């Protein structure tokens, strides 16, 4: 389903017995905002995994926000590993690719903020939605096209243009597209609803919803925890 179809379904659902907090005739912009709230909520529930999120480095900058579209092509909820100039960075144990923990890192690099620019060799989890790249990148490294983050992501908001029209292009499988409109209807009728309350009400709408979501979530969990990627299992890389 594309964005216009989701808006139409949302309008039909609300026409039965629910009132939209935006009024009787909400604009497309207002409906889109409700749909995108539901899209983000569902993408978290599905544990979307993308092994190749574009990562924009800045010369000399060690800290990066993973919820900023100026930094990443998709908001990253939980990074798995980072690729710099085509090379995946190793974890603290040097037994695989991955992130360093803050305590592991600060114990070895207490003066990390004073590091000279060069080729980064470590990616460090640093608070909520933030990572440190050590050492800070040079201009040459920052300009490379092969800088990526693999991890759990949120779907980008739909705009109705190009790849931001169909939720499938954001990694949301077709079999749960209607759930986006159902969740949006619940949110539109009760704007202070929590995501978990929304899921409980959604289950009443669609009895098969939980089974569909669980199957997709389990596969994404498997991909994340195995650190593997298989062609055909996400948007562009994984076709769920």
Image (cartoon, helix red, strand yellow):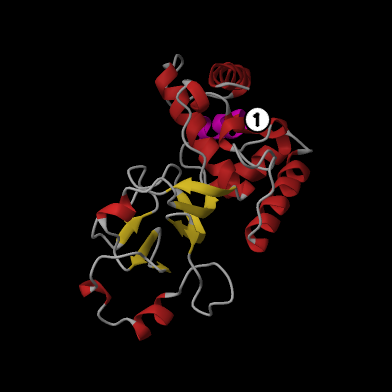
Q: Where is the N terminus found, in terms of image quarters?
A: top right
Residue occupying the point 63% across, 58% down:
224
Q: Eyeballing the image, is 230 above or below 163?
A: below
- When asked about the image quadrant of residue 233, the answer is top right
Residue occupying the point 30% across, 60% down:
137
* Residue identified by numbered label 1: 177
Q: Eyeballing the image, is 162 above or below 235?
A: above
Asked if residue 5 is among those painted magenta in the image, a careful observer would answer no
Q: Position of residue 32 (x, y in %)?
A: 46, 25
Q: Position of residue 133 (x, y in %)?
A: 35, 64
The secondary structure that most of the magenta stretch takes on is helix
Q: Position of residue 138 (x, y in %)?
A: 27, 58
Left of 127 or right of it: where is 139?
Answer: left
Residue in front for this viewpoint, 39 or 63: 63
- When asked about the image quadrant of residue 168, the answer is top right
Number of numbered discs visible in the structure rendering: 1
* Direction left: furthest residue: 114
Range shown magenta? 181-190
Q: For the residue labelled by badge 1, is the local secondary structure a helix, a strand or a loop?
A: helix
Residue 106 visible to the viewer: yes
Left of 224 or right of it: where is 113?
Answer: left
Residue occupying the point 41% across, 23% down:
30
């Amino acid at each position: 389903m594309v964005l216009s179809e989701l808006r139409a379904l949302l309008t039909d659902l609300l026409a039965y017995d629910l009132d939209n907090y935006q009024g009787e005739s909400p604009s497309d912009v207002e409906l889109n905002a409700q749909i995108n709230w539901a899209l983000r909520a569902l993408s978290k529930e599905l544990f979307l995994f993308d092994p190749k999120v574009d990562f924009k480095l800045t010369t000399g900058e060690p800290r990066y926000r993973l919820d900023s579209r100026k930094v990443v092509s998709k908001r990253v909820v939980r990074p798995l590993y980072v690729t710099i100039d085509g090379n995946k960075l190793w974890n603290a144990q040097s037994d695989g690719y991955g992130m360093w923990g803050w305590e592991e890192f600060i114990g070895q690099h207490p003066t990390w903020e004073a590091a000279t620019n060069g080729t980064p060799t470590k990616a460090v989890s640093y608070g909520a939605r933030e990572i440190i790249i050590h050492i800070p990148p040079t201009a040459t490294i920052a300009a490379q096209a092969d800088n990526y983050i693999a991890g759990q992501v949120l779907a980008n908001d739909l705009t109705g243009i190009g790849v931001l029209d169909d939720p499938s292009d954001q990694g949301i499988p077709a079999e749960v597209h209607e759930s986006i409109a159902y969740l949006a209807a619940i949110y539109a009728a009760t704007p202070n609803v929590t995501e978990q309350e929304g899921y409980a009400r959604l289950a009443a709408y669609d009895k098969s919803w939980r089974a569909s979501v669980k199957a997709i979530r389990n596969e994404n969990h498997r991909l994340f925890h195995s650190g593997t990627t298989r062609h055909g299992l996400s948007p562009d890389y994984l076709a769920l």
